Image (cartoon, rainbow, N blue to C red):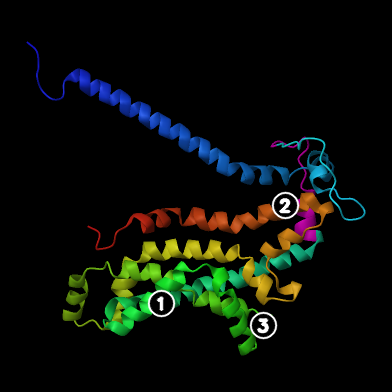
C-alpha cells in the first residue's frame, strides 16, 4: 500500500543527505576563509624564529633600495616560508634585552590603552544608565547626537580634537590621547541599547523593595550588561591598541609614540626584528580575545532581559 503523506521515508532521507552536503560545503568554505585570514598571522610568527640571513634571502629584494633612495626592481619571486631552516631566538633576544626602544614603545601602548579602556567603560555605564532611566526631549536630543558621532569616522573629528587639545594646552601629552578616548561615544551607544532591554518590571520591583537609583544601577544594570561590558571592552582595547592617526597628529615627540606607530618605522636592515616585534605586539590582543571570547559571543547574541 502506497503512502500519500507529505513526507515519505525516501523524501526524509533525501532531505537529510542534502542537509549534510550543505553543512559540509559551508564547513569547507569557512575553513578556507579561516586559513586565508590566519595566513599573515602564522607567517609572521614562524618567520620571527628565522635567522637574519634566512629572512634576507627570502624577503631581501622587497626591502632593497638604491643609494639614491629609489626602489630596486624585483626580478625574483618572494619566497614565502612557514618553517624556518634553523630556529633562532636572536630576534627576540635583540628586542627584549638589547634594544629597550621596542619595550618602551610597547609600554607606551599599554599606558594609552588601559586607562582609556577602564574610564571609557565607567563613563559609558553611567551615561547609558542615565539614558535608560530618564525620559524627555533633551535626553533624546543628546542621544541622537551620540548616534551621529558614532557614525562619524575618527578622521572627521581629528581636526576638532587637535584644535581643542591645542586650546587646552595638552598637545604632545598623554592627555591628548586619553581625553578623546575616554569620552568616545561608541561604548555609550552600545551599552544604552543593552540597558534599554532591561524589563521595566524588574526595575519597578526593585523600587518597591526600597532600592534607590544606585542600588538599581549596581545590582541590576551592571550584572545584566556583563556580557555587553566584556564585548565593548574587547572592541575598545583592540581599537585603541591599534590606533595610528591619533598619536601621529596629537603627539609630536617620537618618544611618546605607541608601538603601532613605531612598527612602521623599523629600518630596512631590521626585517627580522619587524617580525619579532609584530609577534609581541599581537600577544595582548590575542590574550584579551581568548579570555573574553565567550563573553563576546554572549554580548553579541544576547537580546537583553532576564535569563531563566
What residue range appears in magenta? Answer: 82-97
Residue at the spot x=36%, y=76% of the render?
Answer: 143
User: Taking 307 as reference, is 1 above or below it?
Assistant: above
Residue 218 is labelled as: none
Task: Determine the secondary structure under disc 2.
Answer: helix
The residue at the far left in this view is 1
Task: Determine the secondary structure under disc 1.
Answer: helix
Q: Quadrant of residue 116?
A: bottom right
Tell me where residue 217 appears, x and y as whole percent. 31, 77
Q: Quadrant of residue 265?
A: bottom right
Q: Which residue is mark 3?
A: 171
Tell me where residue 125 appears, x and y as whole percent. 39, 75
Q: Residues within 10 Å of mark 2 (few under 14, many from 20)?
A: many
Q: How many numbered marks, from 0 up?
A: 3
Q: Quadrant of the N terminus?
A: top left
Instruction: Confirm whether the magenta stretch covers residue 260.
Output: no
Q: Which residue is mark 2?
A: 276
Looking at the image, is mark 3 or mark 2 nearer the viewer? Answer: 3
Residue at the spot x=62%, y=55% of the render?
Answer: 282
Looking at the image, is mark 3 or mark 1 nearer the viewer? Answer: 1
Tell me where residue 222 appears, x and y as whole percent. 34, 71
Q: In 3D space, how far apart are the residues under numbered discs 3 and 2 (Cα atoms)?
A: 32 Å
User: Taking 160 as reference, is 280 above or below it?
Assistant: above
Q: Which comes before the other along the chain, label 3 or label 2? A: 3
- Depth check: 219 or 120 in front? 120
Amino acid at each position: 500500500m502506497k503512502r500519500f503523506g507529505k513526507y515519505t521515508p525516501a523524501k526524509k532521507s533525501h532531505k537529510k543527505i542534502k542537509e549534510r552536503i550543505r553543512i559540509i560545503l559551508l564547513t569547507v568554505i569557512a575553513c578556507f576563509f579561516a586559513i586565508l585570514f590566519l595566513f599573515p598571522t602564522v607567517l609572521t610568527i614562524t618567520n620571527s624564529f628565522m635567522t637574519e640571513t634566512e629572512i634576507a634571502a627570502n624577503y631581501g629584494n622587497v626591502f632593497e633600495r638604491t643609494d639614491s633612495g629609489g626602489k630596486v626592481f624585483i626580478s625574483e619571486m618572494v619566497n614565502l616560508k612557514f618553517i624556518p631552516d634553523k630556529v633562532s631566538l636572536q630576534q627576540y633576544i635583540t628586542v627584549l634585552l638589547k634594544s629597550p626602544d621596542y619595550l618602551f614603545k610597547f609600554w607606551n601602548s599599554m599606558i594609552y590603552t588601559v586607562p582609556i579602556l577602564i574610564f571609557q567603560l565607567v563613563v559609558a555605564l553611567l551615561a547609558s544608565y542615565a539614558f535608560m532611566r530618564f525620559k524627555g526631549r533633551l535626553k533624546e536630543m543628546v542621544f541622537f547626537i551620540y548616534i551621529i558621532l558614532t557614525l562619524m569616522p575618527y578622521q572627521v573629528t581629528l581636526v576638532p580634537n587637535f584644535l581643542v587639545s591645542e586650546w587646552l594646552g595638552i598637545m604632545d601629552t598623554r592627555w591628548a590621547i586619553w581625553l578623546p578616548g575616554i569620552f568616545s561615544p561608541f561604548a555609550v551607544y552600545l551599552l544604552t541599547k543593552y540597558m534599554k532591554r532591561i524589563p521595566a518590571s524588574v526595575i519597578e520591583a526593585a523600587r518597591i523593595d526600597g532600592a534607590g537609583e544606585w542600588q538599581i544601577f549596581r545590582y541590576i544594570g551592571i550584572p545584566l550588561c556583563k556580557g555587553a561590558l566584556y564585548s565593548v571592552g574587547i572592541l575598545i582595547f583592540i581599537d585603541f591598541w591599534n590606533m595610528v592617526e591619533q598619536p601621529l597628529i596629537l603627539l609630536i615627540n617620537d618618544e611618546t609614540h605607541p608601538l603601532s606607530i613605531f612598527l612602521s618605522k623599523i629600518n630596512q636592515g631590521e626585517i627580522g626584528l619587524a617580525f619579532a616585534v609584530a609577534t609581541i605586539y599581537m600577544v595582548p590582543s590575542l590574550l584579551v580575545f581568548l579570555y573574553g571570547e565567550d563573553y563576546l559571543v554572549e554580548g553579541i547574541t544576547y537580546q537583553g532581559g532576564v535569563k531563566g
